[in-house]
Image (spheres, helix red, strand yellow):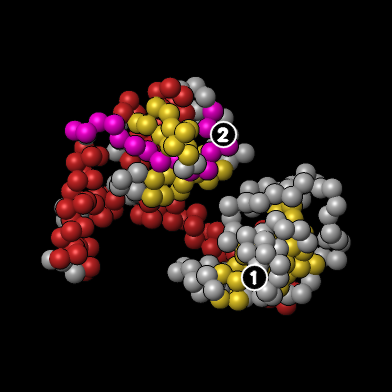
Amino acid sequence: MSHNVEITSDLINTQIFVKPGTTWDQFGQRLNELTGVDVKDMKLVLDGDAQRSRYLKELRDEKVENVHSVAVLDTNENSLANQLRNDMIRNDNDVSFEYTKEDYENRSDSVLQWKKRNQLGKFNPEYRSKMEEQLQLNIDRATELQNQIGQRCRVVSSEESSDSPATPERRGWLRYVGKVLEINDAGVWCGIEFDEPVGKNNGTFQGTKYFGPVNENYGGFVKPVTVEVGTQFTPLIDDELMLTDDEL
């Protein structure tokens, strides 16, 4: 099943889709395009765990599975990517002391312009298209849910088919639909009061109460496309409950 993987390096921070069966050898070519780091020089930190750091050449034919984030380290001090990183550090200092934001955005020798030229991160048309499509799906679904606050619901993984009886899910009450103002984006969220402590908060986010408050870890904010409403969603008893990264 395809899944999102967050990619970070000294130069980028973006997300890409990984198809089922993709090997690290294949994935390395994509990482090279995104980060500018030569495959033979890549050391990878998986899911932020330094203990899981591996050279890409050691992984080779292994599948890219159960990984949600990859930090790409460049072990070649003389590489182009490291030169760009050093330029970025100098440019950041320049921006802080000599350039306005507008001046920096208009410079031809900045890392920002390098990203634009190589269509990386938010400048990647395919990535922007997917994000815009997902945003519209969430807005449309949120509109449908506006008049259903207070009803029973279930939350399923956005990467699973909601029609599948095997889809991991959590159940509870729909308590809020709208923006979370502390997040600087155009997205909308659903606030859920869960039946079990499978959430990430108590109905507040960064000090702002959006519903409740409920007991700690009984609240969560999830994407509207993951929410289904109906009286049939009675509390689960022995079913598996799953926490996802697609929430706050």
Please name whichever residue, 160 or 171, is drawn nearer the observer in this view of the structure: 171
Q: Residue at x 21, y 37 (%)?
A: 80
Residue 150 position by quadrant: bottom right
Q: Is residue 44 above or below residue 99?
A: above
| x and y, in percent, of residue 103 in the image | 17, 66
| x and y, in percent, of residue 197 in the image | 72, 58
**Residue position for label 1:** 203
Disc 2 crowd rating (10 Å Cα; few below 14, some 14-19, many 20+) is: some
Left or right relative to 126: residue 89: left
- Dot 1 lies on which element? loop
Main secondary structure along the magenta-highlighted residues:
loop
- Identify the amino acid type marked 1: Gly
Q: Is residue 171 visible?
A: yes
Residue 65: mark = 2
| x and y, in percent, of residue 247 in the image | 59, 59
Check residue 70 for magenta coloring: yes
Q: Residue at x 58, y 52 (%)?
A: 245
| x and y, in percent, of residue 107 in the image | 16, 59
Q: Is residue 198 above or below residue 140?
A: above
Q: How many marks?
A: 2
Please name whichever residue, 183 or 205, is drawn nearer the observer in this view of the structure: 205
- Mark 1 or mark 2: whose residue is earlier in sequence: 2
Disc 1 crowd rating (10 Å Cα; few below 14, some 14-19, many 20+) is: many
The residues colored magenta run: 63-78
- Dot 2 lies on which element? loop
Q: Is residue 170 above or below residue 190?
A: above
Please name whichever residue, 3 or 191, is drawn nearer the observer in this view of the structure: 191
- Identify the amino acid type marked 2: Glu
Left or right relative to 34: residue 80: left
**The N terminus: image quadrant:** top right
Check residue 49 for magenta coloring: no
